Image: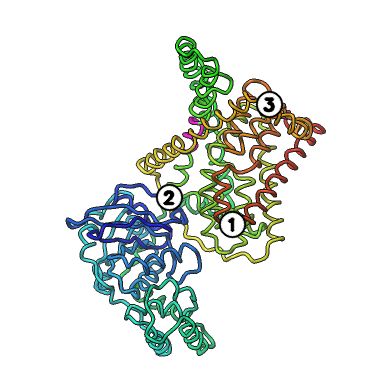
Amino acid sequence: MSVLAAPSRAKTLALVGNPNVGKSVLFNRLTGRYAAVSNYPGTTVDISTGWTVLGGGKWRVVDTPGVNALLPSSEDERVTRDFLWRERPDVVVNVLDAKNLRRGLVLTLELAEQGIPMVVVLNLIDEAMDRGIAVDAEGLARRLGVPVVCTVATTGDGLPALKKMIPLAGRSVAVPTLPPEIQHSLKSLESVFHESRGRPVAIALLAGDDTALTHGGVPLAEGQTDGSVYAAAERERARYAARTPRQILFESREARARELVAESVTQGGRLRPGLSQTLGRWTLRPWPGYLIGLVVLYAVYLFVGVFGAGTAVDFLENTVFGRWIVPAVAWAAERWVPWPAVRDFLVGPYGVVSMALSYAFALILPIVATFFIAFGLLEDSGYLPRLSVLLDRVFRLMGLNGRAVLPMILGLGCDTMATMTTRILDTRKERVIVTLLLALTVPCSAQLAVILGMAAGLSPKVLLLWLTVVVGTTWLAGWGASRILPGSRSTFLMEIPPIRRPLLRNIGMKMRLRLWWYLKEVVPLFIYGTAALFFLDRWGVLKILERIFSPVVKGFLGLPVQATEAFLIGFLRRDYGAAGLYRLQQQGALDLRQVAVSLVLITLFMPCVAQWLMMFKERGWKGALAITGAVLGIALLIAGGVNQLILIFPGLVL
């Protein structure tokens, strides 16, 4: 985990809070830089860094992963804890959800034990007021001994006051009262450290976190060794029988948090629920929750599959590129480029303009753009976490829980980033299963957009068959992996945000950055892939590869030989292979059966290079190779089975 080094004259400000309390929005407001603003927990997996000016001085602002505790039980919590210990920021801005103050104050009390100057932010204060919750911010500030500011991060309300308070941050006096036996144990463990700031490390050791000594960064007292410290911690923990020190520490903070809430929060009369609250409840119930989900998915299909992949693609491909750009470049190349090979490289069958740029900007860009808009609306509205609750029972059949829905849904945007966010899952078994499913059955945004484009205008049976096969494969692969891999499923706990009106400003920023990612990361791959095809074609390698793989492609899969190159380039990027199949469909080279088989195979096929490398990073080379072999075998077996099934029952697609 690397964080930008700050100049010596700059101070460091760390944003710390529970998941889904608005830290990343505040980060953007403070620094002017956008950092994955989403209405669901688990988005900020890595540390993000930006800069701002406060009180006439330059500050480094660090957005840490959302955590529920500093005694780590997940990688997110360990990252945040280690950052606070290693970097010792000058100020911590502790962001709380004003609607759920008790939960946030438990973390506040943990931060108070760290002895770092702090400012407490009561974010989402508007939603708290809508629910009849009134918070005495001034009274809470007196009890905590630190500044307390009320904000609405999405609108910027309270931000000027926050900026004024940050230089006035102080150390909290609201350290919870601990039982005498805990105090005795901590005093014994603190004596093994050379410095007084060893108390947070002593608390972690007493709670059973044996990594605290490695990450604490506090020198040991003279004569002490790591072994002697671990032995001392083990002796102290052995003194407790009925309740562990970790339980006692949590209960002490919980009790103090309840006291603070009782002293600072007033709950008004029962308010009449508004439309957003009513809709929020509906989306969490099986009925009409599943119906709402189907309506939402159908609306996405109409916007992305019909408008994006139909109207927009038709105009850009047939008019912009077909009538204007490609003929103009071909005319210029014929007139001013004397070398036939260079002309073919520009506008030939595998030309940079006629194929790469046409694919990137005419076929893929309008579909990806409309998908990004739809996905941004679902993110910003707070609807995505509700799918986690609705689908928790389904995921339990695969040895997972509803929390796994988050990386799976993120995979619809980018499977590479979703593979990285499997870190939010609590057990290794869950992380391996979700990594397998992301590589096998979850198409990324560009790939899904092309799939919707291929299915648009065809018989609904084709899309229904594809969806049935992909969902069935997902369940079978997850169920099988849950039976083979050792370990158990973790407990499902998730904070559900309210249904909110999406802000055009947030969606616009997401759209801009995601399109920039597409132009920067994906378009060059289209050019490189086309160049590779150009040279492979000129050297005759494509013909050789087609002959090698044609028995599988043409015989077992029942596809035209030309589809081979789409799958070969799919190793570079799956959406590029999907675009090649899309072009074959538009040229009339694929019938309904072949379209259905192509949709299944390009969905289940090998992950792109970027995702493949991320799998190596996250799961190790043995795990990545095992997942790769499983994906390739399952993809060919399922696609071939679909081909044989349609040959026997052609009514499945007709």
Question: Depth-wise, is mark 1 or mark 2 nearer the camera?
Answer: 1
Question: Could you tell me which secondary element the residue under label 3 belongs to?
Answer: loop
Residue of label 1: 619
Residue of label 3: 562
Give, as a three-letter code, the residue at label 2.
Answer: Ser
Magenta residues, start to end: 365-371
Q: Is residue 320 left or right of residue 219?
A: right
Do the residues under discs 1 and 3 have CB atoms within 8 angstroms?
Answer: no
Residue 202 position in % (x across, y down):
41, 80
Give, as a three-letter code, the residue at label 3.
Answer: Gln
Mark 2 or mark 3, which has the lower sequence index?
A: 2
Asked if one can make out residue 483 in the rendered structure from this viewpoint, the answer is yes
Give, as a three-letter code, the residue at label 1.
Answer: Arg
Tell me the distance, in whole angstroms, between the alpha carbons under discs 1 and 3.
35 Å
In the image, residue 141 sits, relative to residue 471, either above or below, namely: below
Asked whether residue 506 is drawn in magenta, I would say no
Asked whether residue 366 is drawn in magenta, I would say yes
Q: Is residue 375 left or right of residue 151?
A: right
Which of these two is toward me, 474 or 465?
474
Tell me the distance, in whole angstroms, between the alpha carbons under discs 2 and 3.
41 Å
Asked if one can make out residue 98 in the rendered structure from this viewpoint, the answer is no
Residue of label 2: 38
Residue 309 position in % (x across, y down):
54, 29
Q: Where's the C terminus, which quadrant?
A: top right
Q: Which label is found at residue 270?
A: none
Question: Could you tell me which secondary element the residue under label 1 belongs to?
Answer: helix
Residue 139 position in % (x across, y down):
25, 71
Residue 588 position in % (x across, y down):
66, 21
In the image, residue 78 sits, relative to residue 507, either above or below, namely: below
Q: Residues within 10 Å of mark 2 (few under 14, many from 20)?
A: many
Q: Main secondary structure of the magenta part?
A: helix
